[in-house]
Structures are given as structure tokens and as C-alpha cells.
Image: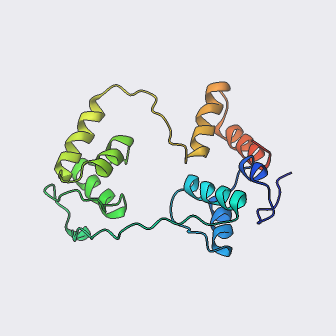
Amino acid sequence: MKPKLNKHISPDDFISHYWLKRELLNFCRKRSIPQQGSKQELTKRIEQFLITGTIKTTHKAPQKSSGFDLNHLTRNTRITHDMKLGTHLRVFFMKEIGPQFHFNKTIREFIKHQQGKTLGDAIAAWYQNAKKPKKLTSIEPQFEYNRHIRDYFKKHPGTKLSDAILEWKKNKKMKR
């Protein structure tokens, strides 16, 4: 049975159970632990708090905004450090590429690591990747549900998605 997530939970019990991000955020909020970041970052912060009883804070210098206008994106728009994958970029790419566009790993990594390049360069990279034969890509650690579904179908070929989801819900309540 899953224990309550509170300041008295042991670090081992905490790590060995599945927690929803909202549960982690709620725990952080009640203890003034920084709430930004991925589920993995929150988990590490909470684990450190449970082990040491202290909150490790990091001070990042604020980054200047790029000042690009999300409503007027063009192929010549430069990619900046603070460009986020959101609705405006999705609409732009779907207009430029078509309904087959989706944020795949290539485009996510391009936007994240190619500051100074243009959205036109990102479109070219997307098309170049689309021509490559499809291979099974790795699923980032924060996408636990997606990894479970892929692993389930690998272990149980020919089963239904509803079976995989049922197994996910069952495992989520148990220890890992």
C-alpha cells in the first residue's frame, strides 16, 4: 500500500513509489520547496529534503527575453534561448509543413540546442528527419506512462491498449 506523502515518509519509501506531479507539487508548496522544473527535478528536491531536512536552492541569473513576437513568426525568425514549444509554434509549423507536422524529438532538440538558427532551418531539419526510415526512439525518463505502454506491448504483443492502461493503473498503486 502506498504511504502518505508527508515530511515523515522515509526517503526509501518515497523513491520506491509512483507519485503524480501534482502530489509532488503539493508537497513542495507546503514546505516552500521550489516548484519549477520536471517531475525528476521535483523528486530529487524532495528526496534531498527528506534526507537532510534542508532545501537546496539554486540562484540563476535572470535571462533576458528575446523579444520575438509569437504572433508574427516567419521562416526568418531566430531561435532563442527562451523559445518554448507551444501553441504559437505548433500553429506556425502546421501552416508551413501541413497537418502531418508534430513536435518530434528532432524539432524539440533543434529548438532547444540551435539558438541563432532560424525557424526555416528547423523546418528543413524536420523534413530531413521525415525522410529517414523510422526507428524506435528512446522515450525520455519523465514520460513514464509512454515507456510503460511501449514496454507492455513489447512484452505482450497483440494485446489491447486498454490492457496496458489497466496494468499501468495497477502498477501505479504498487511499489516499483
Does residue 82 show up?
A: yes
Q: Is residue 102 left or right of residue 136?
A: left
In this orientation, which residue lies closer to the viewer: 119 or 50?
50
**What percent of the width, then of the height, locates residue 84?**
35, 60
Quarter of the picture containing the C terminus is top right
Residue for point 23% across, 56% down:
79
**What percent of the width, then of the height, locates residue 5?**
76, 62
Q: Is residue 138 left or right of residue 54?
A: left
Residue for point 67% across, 73% down:
31
Q: Residue furthest left?
A: 76
Does residue 100 show up?
A: no
Rendered view: 77 above or below 111: below
Rendered view: 159 above or below 112: above
- Which color mode does the image show? rainbow
Residue for point 48% across, 65% down:
58
Locate residue 47: give its quadrant: bottom right
**What percent of the width, then of the height, locates residue 4?**
81, 61
Count of numbered circles on the image: 0
In this orientation, which residue lies closer to the viewer: 3 or 168?
3
Rendered view: 135 above or below 55: above
Q: Is residue 63 left or right of residue 7?
A: left
Locate residue 160: give its quadrant: top right
**What percent of the width, then of the height, locates residue 139?**
50, 39
